[in-house]
Image (cartoon, rainbow, N blue to C red):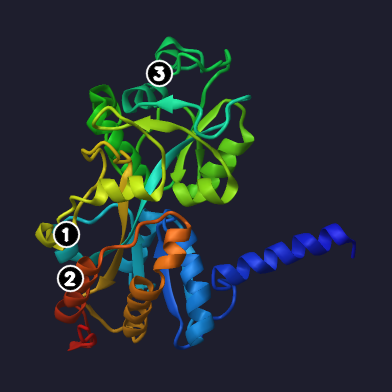
Amino acid sequence: MDRLRLIKMAAILSALALCGAAAAPIEADDISGAGATFPYPVYAKWAEAYKQQTGIGLNYQSIGSGGGIKQIEASTVTFGASDKPLEPADLKQNGLVQWPQIIGGVVPVVNIPGIKPGDLVLDGPTIGAIYLGNISRWNDPAIKKLNPTLALPKLDIAPVYRSDGSGTNFLFTNYLSQVSPSFARSIGANTSVQWPVGIGAKGNEGVANQTAQTSGAIGYVEYAYVKQTNMTYARLINHDGKTVVPEAKAFQAAAASADWAKAEGYCLILTDQPGAASWPITGASFILIHADSKDKSTLAALKFFDWAYRSGRPLAEGLDYVPLPGPVVQLVEKTWQDAIKVDGKAVWTAK
C-alpha cells in the first residue's frame, strides 16, 4: 500500500471517529440523534470529547432539519435537531419538547477568481435578486455599486442551494423574505423551496463542496464550514446599514435581545436583527425530544446536552458558535424537569 493510500485511509478513519463512528453498532448507553447539518461541526466535537470523558457515544446523522423532524416524530432516534423552530401547535400535536442548544450564523460564500475572503460586500436584496435569477453576472451594476473598488469579472453567477429539507434553507430564505419583497412573493421562507435557478446540493457539506468546485458560484453555509475550510465569504450589510464580518461577536450581537422566556416553546427566529454589529443571518439550532418517551436513552441525551452547555463552551467558541447564556440554560433545564418524562416519570432534576 503506497503512502497516498495510507494518508487517505487515515483521513477516513479520523472522520469516522469524529462523528462517533456512525457505521459501528450503537452501545446500550449510546445516544442516537438526527437532523440539522448547521450544528454538525460542534456536535461532532462535543461527541468526541464526551466519549473520551464518559465512554458514552453520540450517533448523530447529519441529514438536514427536515429529516431530523421526521425521525423524531417516528421515534427512530432519541432526539431530532432542527434550525427551524417548530411552532407551539406542532410541538403539542406531536408530543414534543423543544429547546435551543447553540447559536451560529449562515454565511454567503463565493468562488470568484481573484476575490479573497471578505473582499466582496453584498446586501440582502442583491442576494435575493441573484437567487431569483435577476442578477446573473458578477460585474452586474448592482454588485459593482456595493463594491466600487473591487475588480469584478464578467463571469456568470452559479447559485448553489440546499436541495434537502433544511433549517439553513429556512434561515436563509427567512432573511431574504424580510429584506426583499420580490423574493418573499416568488420563493418565500421555508425549509424546502422551489428555486428558479442554480445547482442543488445536499447538506451544508454539499453546498460548501459544490461552491468550492464551481467557478462563479455563490452558496450559503454555517460559519463553521467556512472557518474549517477557509472558504471565501462575503461581508453583509445588516439591518442598520452597517457592513459586518461573520464572526462570533456578530452572531452574539444578533442574539443579544432574544427573550427566550417569552417565546412559547422557545420558538424564536434571530434573522435581520437590529444593531450596528449584528450579523443578519443568525439563528439558533434546536433539539426536539418526546415529552413522554419510552426511549431509555432520554436521560443520557439530557446529560449530554447538560454537559455541552456547561463544559462544551470552549469547543463551541473555537468554531465561532455562540453558547447560550447561563440564565437561558437554567430556563431550559427547568423545562426538562417539568416537561420531559420516560414512561410517565420525570427524569431530570434541575440544578
Residue 192 vs residue 255: left or right?
right
Residue type of the residue flagged with mark 2: Leu
Identified at 24% across, 70% down, the residue is 329
* 39 is higher (above) or lower (below) than 201: below
Residue 40 in sight: no
Identified at 14% across, 59% down, the residue is 88
Q: Earlier in the sequence, mark 1 or mark 3?
A: 3
Q: Circle 3 is placed at which residue position?
A: 146
Residue 272 vs residue 150: left or right?
left
Residue 350 vs residue 33: left or right?
left
Residue 130 in the image: state x and y as whole percent: 41, 23
Q: Are marks 2 and 1 in contact (CB under 8 Å)?
A: yes
Residue 5 is tagged as none
Q: Circle 1 is placed at which residue position?
A: 260
Q: Circle 2 is placed at which residue position?
A: 331
SS at badge 3: helix
Residue type of the residue flagged with mark 1: Trp
Identified at 56% across, 81% down, the residue is 25
Residue 212 in the image: state x and y as whole percent: 60, 38
Question: Could you classify mark 3 by the number of other residues whose Cα lies within 10 Å: few (under 14), some (14-19), or many (20 or more)?
Answer: some
Q: Earlier in the sequence, mark 2 or mark 3?
A: 3
